[in-house]
Image (cartoon, rainbow, N blue to C red):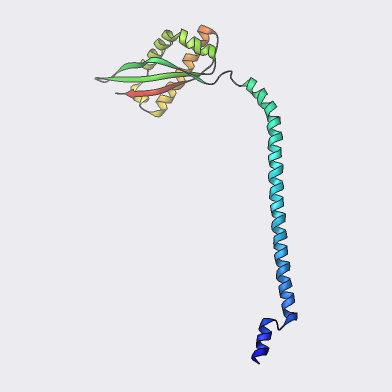
Amino acid sequence: MAAEQDLKLDGGGDAGETPSGGGKKKLIIIIVAVLLLIGAAVGATLFFLSGDDESEAGEEGGEAAEEVVEEPDIPAQYIILKPEFVVSFQVGTRQRFLQANIEVMTRKQTVADALSLHEPMIRSNIIRILGEQNFKALRTPEGRMALQDQLTQHVNQLIKRESGVEGVEAVLFTDFVMQ
């Protein structure tokens, strides 16, 4: 009896074991085939996408050359107006001060040259505009933004009037101290 049980455990039901062993083998083969198909699909996708990127890069290279012509000739230049601007305000009975370091941003060399050439006139007008401001309004971010916009428009008008070119993109405060 023990021998029969050993035979059954070791290899006693050949007919029952073949289908389950064969079924497991088939399942493993199917899983491996599916994984290979997924891997092939991912590989093909990456291959075709990388091939498209290269061909698009070549096509975009021609477009980029056209865009370079449309873009500004030189990168942004920042012209520092030195020394800093100091303006006094009479607020009630107290004397208040504003100190601002200002830089002008442009992308055109002709505008940069005009800013350097006409700097005394530009500084004088900036000081006048700063002195006309409401001290309490300048304490708010909105007031400073409005002042920046006003200065940008005014400096652009001065450069256009004196040199015949436009191109002042922004007047930037690199330091803005109020006392």
Left or right, 143 with reference to 45? left
Q: Position of residue 106 (x, y in %)?
A: 51, 18
Q: Position of residue 19 (x, y in %)?
A: 74, 75
The residue lying furthest to the bottom in this view is 1
Q: Position of residue 155 (x, y in %)?
A: 47, 14
Residue 72: image quadrant is top right
Front position in the image: 121 or 143 = 121
Residue 110: image quadrant is top right
Residue drawn at the location 72% of the way across and 78% of the way down: 17
**Looking at the image, residue 74 lies above or below residue 9:** above
Residue drawn at the location 66% of the way across and 89% of the way down: 3
For the C terminus, the quadrant is: top left
Front position in the image: 27 or 68 = 27
Q: Is residue 158 visible?
A: no
The residue lying furthest to the left in this view is 93
Front position in the image: 44 or 163 = 44
Residue drawn at the location 69% of the way across and 35% of the way down: 54
Residue drawn at the location 66% of the way across and 92% of the way down: 1
Q: Position of residue 12 (x, y in %)?
A: 71, 84
